[in-house]
Image (spheres, helix red, strand yellow):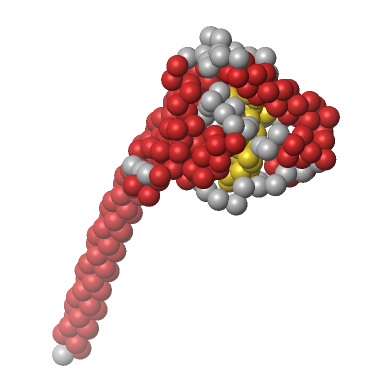
Amino acid sequence: MRWFEGNVASAVQTAKTQKSVFIVFIAGEGAKTEEMETFLHSEEVTKPCEESNCVAIKIAGGSNDCKFFSQIYPVVVIPSVFFIGDNGVPLEVIGECKSSQDFSEKVTKALEMQKNMSSLSGAGNTETPNQPAQVEQKSNDMTSTESVQPTAGTAEEKRGGAASDAGSGDDSLEQQAVGGVESTDTPAKLEEKVDRAKELIEQKRQEKMQKEAEDERRREIERRNIGQGVQKLREQQKEMQLLEAKRELQKDKENDRLARQKVKEEIERDRSVRACVLLYWGIIM
């Protein structure tokens, strides 16, 4: 696959001018991204894409370009490949493939769908049946979004980041949201699947918030229990100190009493000895 060297806005404009399929590869990190990029560079994919003058661009998941792109075409799985028609209709969204053959078959279906749509347009049908009128403006919206990228608000970046985090954090969610997208889906079905993906992401976000709230309550209870335990331990230590001080005071009093008793006994002995001496000398004299 030959990647477009300009920015996203230039790639969109080139694809519209050439009336060709716009291919967007949302790349992540890891073995799945490497495997998908290998599929994209295979001859079975590269040859028909070059023959159809496809414009392909590679965007890093989590980047600002990815966040702005996901505002128009929600990115609910990384890695993934979007095949977008010249009128802004998603022809195919590939979230995961089991083999290179499966991947190339989906690419072929997307290119054939673009040819059929071009044929209908040449015959006078300017819109795909059941296609909402606003879908045609998606490519223009993406170009406009790219041009105002330096002044984008933090709230939009957070929304984009949240969508990307929720998608990459749960493989089963990704498969439910994107794995079933086929080239035969009408825009109405695509819109329904996108809404379903958004619901799953919101559900995942709510579950995460609830879990965080429960964890916070649990930590608060643990902090209170620890605080109560520390307070109880301090009270026990204080009681022990008071008892020890009381015992020491009683011991000191007892020692004082014994000391006084000993002094009194010494005095009594001295008196007895003195009386005996006086009596002895009185008798002699």
Q: Quadrant of the N terminus?
A: top right
Give the x, y percent position of residue 192: 53, 14
Q: Please name the residue shown 77% across and 40% down the image.
A: 46
Q: Please name the residue shown 23% across and 71% down the image.
A: 263
Q: How many marks?
A: 0
The quadrant in which residue 103 appears is top right
With respect to residue 283, does 83 lie above or below?
A: above
Query: Is 119 on the left or on the right of 163, as rendered?
Result: right
- The answer to which of 255 and 222 lies nearer the viewer is 222
Specify whether residue 48 is in view: yes
Give the x, y percent position of residue 108: 75, 26
The quadrant in which residue 252 appears is bottom left
Q: Please name the residue shown 57% across and 29% down the image.
A: 86
Give the x, y percent position of residue 268: 22, 71
- The answer to which of 118 and 108 lies nearer the viewer is 118
With respect to residue 129, does 98 lie above or below?
A: below
Specify whether residue 222 is in view: no
- The answer to which of 30 and 156 lies nearer the viewer is 156
Query: Is 217 on the left or on the right of 199, as rendered?
Result: left
| Residue farthest toward the front in the current orientation of the protein | 123
Query: Is 96 on the left or on the right of 26, as rendered?
Result: right
Q: Please name the residue shown 32% across and 53% down the image.
A: 241
Give the x, y percent position of residue 112: 72, 22
